[in-house]
Each structure stands twice: as C-alpha cells, then as structure tokens.
Image: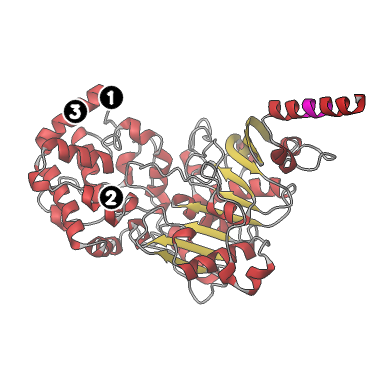
Amino acid sequence: MRKALRCLLSLTMLTGTLGAAGLTAQAATAAGPATGPDIKDRILAIPGMSLVEEKPYTGYRFFVLDYEQPVDHRKPWQGTFKQRITLLHKDTNRPTVFYTSGYNVNTNPRRSEPTTIVDGNQVSMEYRFFTPSRPEPANWSHLNIKQAADDQHRIYQALKKIYGKKWLATGGSKGGMTATYYERFHPKDMDGVVAYVAPNDVVNDEDSAYDRFFAKVGTKECRDKLNNVQREALKRREPLEAKYAAAAAENGWTFNTVGSLDKAYEAVVLDYTWAFWQYSLLSDCGTVPAAATASDQEIWDTVDAISGFSAYTDQGLETYTPYYYQAGTQLGSPDIKQPHLKGLTRYGYQPPRNFVPRDIPMTFQPGVMRDVDTWVKNNAERMLFVYGQNDPWGAEPFRLGYGARDSYVMIAPGANHGANVAKLQEGEKALATARILEWAGVAPAAVQADPAKAKPLARADMKLDRRDTEREPQLRP
C-alpha cells in the first residue's frame, strides 16, 4: 500500500513538474535524451548565441534567440550586430528546414510547408536591417544579398554541429528569393531548396512580362471591373484626397518620404489591380464594386481594403525601408504601363528611391540579378520553384537551363501569391512532396518506389501550420 502511494506521489510530482515547465510528455521527448545535455544548453553554448525567450508548444521546444553577426562578413573585425532568429526544435535526429520570409521573423511558433512535409526542425532568420536585426549606426551599403547569404551560412555552420541531419532552405516571395541567393553563394550548405513565388527581375528596365500578365490574367470582365475602379479613383481624386487628408489627421500619418499626400494617393491607386491579383482569387471579383455607380465611399473602401491607404505614409513605409533599399539597389522593381489610366496619372509607377528616406544613398547595381539568374539556369541542383498562375510576381519567374539537375518549376493553377505544394495539380504535388522527402533523407521506402504515394510526414496543426498571410500594403513581394 505504501509502495503504491509512493508511486502515485512520484507520478503526481512528475506531472506537476512537466505542467509548470509548459511541456507535455511528447514535448519532453522532443527536447532530446534525458541523459544528455538539454537542447537549450547546447544551443546557448554556441559562441554569440543568446536567449530572448522560450515559448512552450506541444511536441516541440521553441526558442527566440539573438545571434551575433559581423556587420560586414568581409571585414568581421569592424563590428557586429545581433540578428534575431527562432528555432522550432523537434529532434536532433530529424532534418532541419532553414526558413526566411526575407523580412522580419515571426516570434510565435510556426511551421513552413517543407517542415511539415519532412516532420523536422525549423530555423527561421530575420533578414538583416529589419528591426531589431539592424546594426547601429546603420551603414546601408552592408545590406545586400551576399551579406544576407553569409548571415545564413554562419547560422547554418553554428547549428549544423547540433542538427547533423540533412538541411533544406525555403521561403516565400522575398524569402524564396533569399533561399535562392543563399544557394547561389553557398551551394554546398543545403541538401535542397524550396522557393515559393520568388520573383526574378533579371533586367530591371524591361518589364513587359508584367504588362502581358495583366492583359490576360483572370477574365476580361474581372480585369475591366478592376481597371474601372482605378480610373474612377483617379477621376475623383479631389474628394477622395480630402478623405485621405482627414484619415491622415486622425491617424497621425505624414508623407515626408514619398513627398506629398498626392503622390501617396496615386501610388495606392496604381497598386490596386496588382494587389488584387496578389492576394485575391478570381472568385473574389464579385466583391469589386461597379465603378460607374459606386459612391465615393465605396471607391474609397475597396481601394483601402485591397491597396491600403496607410501604405505610402511615413509610418507605413518605415518598417519596409530595407526592402525598398534593396529593390532600388539590387533586386529591381516592376514598372507596369497600365494604358487604361492614360491621361489620369501624374507620376506613374514610382521607383523605390521615392520610398526610402533621402539621407540613405542608393545606387542600382544592374548585374546582380543577372548573375543569380545565370547561376540558377546553369547550376541549379535539388531546387524546386513553385508559382501561382494568377500571381503577378510570377510574371518574371526563375527558369531552369540545361545545366540544372533534379530541379523543377511548377505552377499552381488559379493560385495567387499564397501558392504552395499543396495547391499544385495532383501529379506535381506528389512529385514535389516526394523530392522534398528524398532531399531531406526521410522518404519512406514506399515513396522511393512510387512517388505518387508521397504525403507530409507530420500531422496537420492548424495553429502551427498557419501562414500569416495578412494583406500587406504596398507593391512588394
């Protein structure tokens, strides 16, 4: 009886300890063997690594971390900064996915699609110069794709000693671009790359592919509805700009960077059709008002909902200064014609220079994207590019040449900027899933024998797998 009581008491104490730590038995198992060092201790033993916080999540350990990086990898003695990263730890015996959005890092537990497919760990990196991962003082010349690729390389080298299984790089949009650039500069690091909806603006001054896209995307009826709203918004510039001024006063918006409320207003209106196809589906055309009979408020509401009138305010631009700096120095940016607006526009598509404070110098480097494009065509190995059929950013995609090996470009029918493997046609979805599993070294024997049987290894988790695809204002990937 006393023995049974002692066992019950021990079990109660153990349960209470796990509950206090915010871990389930499954999560404790994921933390690693009880006889070895705790995974947090192993991570924090890495020179330059520091803990911001740990957040519990069933089946995982989730850490928000800072990692000390050189401001200039070519001259590491000239100073460092702290780069924010997160680590979703499952097991050191599982593969690891290296994810970046190309912008800020989400400090809540999230799992990218490849991480779900391979049932692995995930390291997520905040792109340099996005707050708080910004050197002080900021020398903006150190914000370029090579320095960012070197950031990833150092993080990989530091964590590979703990996570010794295979690694994949992934990201969507600018994150897909980032994964591609990383592969270009450090092709021996990753065992595979999954780049989603990654634009490839090889020649910045040649953007006719976008014009061709907007001439045929969706249906003529839908295109006409969107074009008519834009025309009506510019025809009614005076009353709608009065509403804009009132909204600016109410919200404390200013327009010093772009130059004027008028410039900001036109930029928002010109983004309208692009933003619709980036975030919406053809089935959403029914929500677009008939411009000719719409009230001023209805025109305002649809433009605000799709483009966002806060986009080109100083407050809206501030977070994305690093993106616009890169667009204006290396990445390139679209300049579409929109002939249906002839005679109504004053500025046309404005360049990235207009969205970056004037005290930050910018000079465009035309050969950078051509170098990456040529490298991908001739050297891509174990790379998968996924695009959405109706996503404007896919109008200038990455393409594969004769030198590419075990690499693929796939298009999800009818999909927008949220295209992924799950939205591909069945045959391509199975093939893509099978290749990801194979690259990660976890393809079951049945999948190796028949790729059509490939499925994600991890169970779906609505919270963990949620894509934070809130509608982002501004014309950016």
Q: Categorize mark 3 by other alpha carbons within 10 Å: few (<14), some (14-19), many (20+).
A: some
State which tag comes first along the sequence, 2 or 3: 3
Label 2 or label 3, whichever lies nearer to me, is 2
User: Position of 432 compared to 390: left or right?
Assistant: right
Residue 166, label in figure: none
Q: Magenta stretch: give its range.
A: 10-14
**Where does the image place residue 28, in percent across and percent down from the top left?**
73, 38
Residue 205 falls within the magenta-colored stretch: no
Q: Indicate the secondary structure of the residue bearing disc 1.
A: helix
Q: Which residue is mark 2?
A: 276
Q: Indicate the secondary structure of the residue bearing disc 3.
A: helix
Q: Residue at x 26, y 61 (%)?
A: 218
**Where does the image place residue 250, in percent across and percent down from the top left?**
24, 22
Q: Which residue is mark 3?
A: 245
Q: Considering only vertical position in the picture, is 402 above or below 305? A: below
Amino acid beneath label 2? Phe
Rendered image quadrant of residue 169: bottom right
Q: Which residue is mark 1?
A: 251
Rendered image quadrant of residue 367: bottom left
Label 2 or label 1, whichever lies nearer to me, is 2
Could you tell me if the residues under marks 2 and 3 are in contact, i.e. CB atoms within 8 Å? no
